[in-house]
Image (cartoon, grey):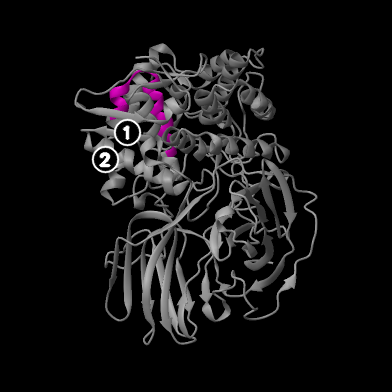
Amino acid sequence: MKNLHILAHAGIYADTCREKDDKIILRITADDYYKVYVNGVFAGQGPAPAYPEMYYYNQWDITHLIKPGENLIAVHAYYQGLVNRVWNSGDGRFGLAADVVTVKKQQESAESLTWKYRICRAYSGKVIGYNTQFLEDFDSRLWDENWNLLQTDAYGQWKDMVTAGWADYRLCLQPTKMLEVYEIPPQIFEKKENGIWFLDIGREIAGSVILKAKGKSGQKIHIFCGEELDKDGNVRYEMRCNCGYHEVWTLDDGICQLEPYDYKGFRYCSVHVEKGAELLEAKVRIRHYPLEESLCTLQTDDVVLKQIFGLCKNTIKYGIQEAYLDCPTREKGQYLGDAVISAKAQVWLSGSTELLRKCIAQFAQTTTICPGLMAVAPGSLMQEIADFSLLWGELLLTDYQFTHDRDYLAAYYPTAKAIIEYFGRYQKENGLLYQVEEKWNLVDWPENLRDGYDFELSRPVVAAGYHNVMNALYVGAVKTLSKLEKILGYPPACDWEKVQKAYVQMFYRPEKKLFADSQKSNHTAVHSNVYPLYFGLVPEEALENIVHFLEKKGLCCGVMLSYFLLKGLARAGYYEVMYKLLVNKSQHGWVNMLREGATTCFEVWGKEQKWNTSLCHPWATAPISLIIEDLGGICLDETEEKGYREDPHLPPQIKEFRLNISWAKRNGLHEKQK
């Protein structure tokens, strides 16, 4: 079973004597996904991907869609069947569950539904991305546009859905908001020659193109979507990110509408209409996690800084979806390391931590697979990255900074401690990690942005020895654990100062006043000096020299590592250096992305710097928190009462700088000191 589309419906009868305050609630879930309609009107979609041990259902208020008498609940459910980072699919299990609940005077009465279904064969297509999704070649001849309305069966027979329990699923209400789904006209919609139409949305989005056309049965329309145009101005549908967005729509007689199900990340679309057919209408259906634009805004006379802030804000809006995705194209998976950066940006922009908490919980669930965590969750693909596992405590600390919820912190403290214990199996007597071979040692990605890091990083690691980044992250994780323990009043599980001393003794080169890449090497990559600066492991005598070294090197590293580099500079008090690198105009920076036409952040600094570059990658949104916390100086306290203090560090050339974070008072985050 793969790429299986199921249409299902259930009738309900509504009381004709319904009172004004009565509510009708639909509780629904499906494995893998559903889109639900009430009397033909779209009501919502979901659930967010989750593990069966904590599988989500959604709750929709459908009161306004229900009429007295007979009504129809119609669901377009989907089972993908691929083992990937998107869903927990490929397991042969496909199901739908729903109740309709009537609420009268705060009293609930639930009605289970009797479902009929049929298989929909209108969709076909090959797999693209990293086994991420199926292309949707759509055949209108096999589609009934009135399938979700009360009607006589238009084709085939509806079958009774088998009633079965979800015995090994633990169903719980989805703890996050539902996606916003809406339609807009393209910014440019123009007819070219030879039946070709061109659409430009004006920016990269996540969604799909909705088309209406008239023709004869069997006529074809070819649809090409892409993130950019080629040198001749054509849509580059064979995209850099390893997705080829070329789909074929087969028309039926008369007027037909294209019904895409899955989503893509793209900006442009080219529609090639076969002679004799006619394109009548084109719209864009956008989907994203709710983000009220006015909740966090920046006004400044620094045009470059404002453009970078807007670029990152767009990336969060369209890139994260129902989880902190690495990208909405090639992988569509929630990566732990990416989330450390994009979660902080998203919480600053929205004032909401529910998506962060879902992320924390889902990675904590992976301890049942490995106590050292998976790198991507949820999802049926098992991928492990040691660097990411050691950063999980940063997510927990971020939640506490915004909420000061000690009970929540205490609930997940055992996971943070278990991660340290897991990596303890690689410790030698000196307390440092030696040849962490079970998980990928990433250091940075792509490989060409590792600044010549001098340690063999095979998968699995076969080179015996100690290397810097793995140990810097380990010392940092132990230090973060000690912070959590201090907040909770727990006794320390580890002596991080002892491990730090061993780390400095092994990797610090006093003659250079820099950290080397490995026990045996004297090469000093950027990466070997970023994490000790970020975690505060640098000897005082070396601080100024390391800062000068990083300033001179610039951002000759991956985009993800730049967060730790720039944040480390700010933590050390070198705000002007941080600002200079943030707005630098070299080929390694956000200005270069803007120069290359970015409307969302790239996976790397420039399109040609990685062979399969994604042009929408939320791990590149470090500037959001850097601008707010370090330039604007809005500091969240870790150990005191919930609140913030203002301590701006603006370079003299910025004359106007206004941050409006309107959610702060609403969330009880009050100003403590100005």
Identified by mark 1, the residue type is Gly
Predominant SS along the magenta part: helix
Marks 1/2: CA–CA distance: 9 Å
Residue 573: % across, % down: 35, 18
Q: Say which residue label 2 marks.
A: 586
Taking 279 as reference, is 142 left or right?
right
The region drawn magenta spans 560-579
Write the residue at 58% across / 62% down.
Answer: 37
For the image, the number of numbered tags is: 2
Label ID, residue 437: none
As displayed, is residue 238 above or below residue 375?
below
As displayed, is residue 17 above or below residue 577?
below
> Tags 1 and 2 in contact by the CB under 8 Å rule?
yes
Which class describes the residues within 10 Å of circle 2: few (<14), some (14-19), or many (20+)? few
**Is residue 540 in the magenta section?**
no
What is the quadrant of the C terminus in the image? top left
Identified by mark 2, the residue type is Ser
Q: Is residue 519 something that shows in the picture?
A: no
Residue 302: % across, % down: 22, 33
The residue nearer to you, when weighing 265 against 610, is 265
Q: Say which residue label 1 marks.
A: 554
Taking 253 as reference, is 73 left or right?
right
What is the quadrant of the N terminus in the image? bottom right
Task: Indicate the secondary structure of the residue bearing disc 2.
Answer: loop
Residue 597: % across, % down: 29, 52
Q: Earlier in the sequence, mark 1 or mark 2?
A: 1
Write the residue at 72% across / 65% down.
Answer: 115
Residue 497 in which image quadrant: top right
Q: Is residue 343 something that shows in the picture?
A: yes
Residue 329: % across, % down: 48, 55
